[in-house]
Image (spheres, rainbow, N blue to C red):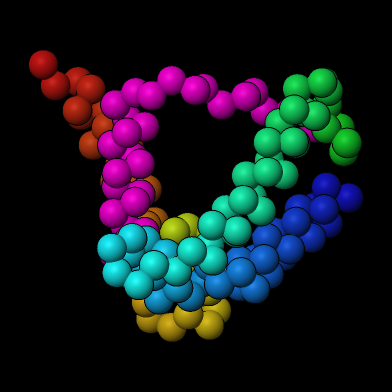
Amino acid sequence: MKNLVTLFCGALFGLGLVVSGMTDTLKVQGFLDFFGVWDATLVFVMGGAIIPMFIAWRIAALREKSVLGGLIPLTPKTELDRPLIIGAILFGAGWGLSGFCPGPAFASSSFGGVGSLTFLAAMLAGMVIAPPIIRAAKAAP
């Protein structure tokens, strides 16, 4: 049952990304171009994600287990630290340069052509090389 719910939720999320335009790199880059011809339509997409999650976190805080019996993850930390800020800068730069972030890149990998596959390969490579770089940076005097 959990696998079916997971499959349904993933498919619904992917469909939402396609319908909302998040897989269209030009639309995303137009949203990030505040000083050019700004396309504000993705503000509604963000609101459509933030508002339900705000409500879901409030409901989850009142429960001990999920509807399907799994553990509910802890509320994310709220303090800003150096890794979070650096990660946000790198994420934003990658998003602005490519027009992709991880979810839409996966959603468009079947029809997005070489660009989405190149982004996915680079993202996966970054995920592999980041941990040793972070460990080395923490170990350095």
Residue 75, horizontal then vertical, whole percent: 62, 24
Q: Nearer the viewer, residue 7 or 19?
A: 19
Residue 118 appears in the picture as rendered: no
Residue 108, horizontal then vertical, whole percent: 53, 74
Q: Nearer the viewer, residue 47 or 8?
A: 47
Q: Nearer the viewer, residue 20 or 4?
A: 20
Residue 56, horizontal then vertical, whole percent: 75, 36
Say which residue appears at 29% left-offset and 44% top-offset: 89
Say which residue appears at 32% left-offset and 33% top-offset: 85
Q: State the quadrant of the C terminus.
A: top left
Is residue 138 toward the left or the right of residue 64 in the image?
left
Any magenta on residue 82? yes
**Quarter of image, res 99:** bottom left
Residue 45 appears in the picture as rendered: yes
Task: Write down the region rendered in magenta.
Answer: 70-98
Looking at the image, the residue that sits furthest to the left is 141
Looking at the image, the residue that sits furthest to the top is 141
Q: Is residue 47 above or below residue 84?
A: below
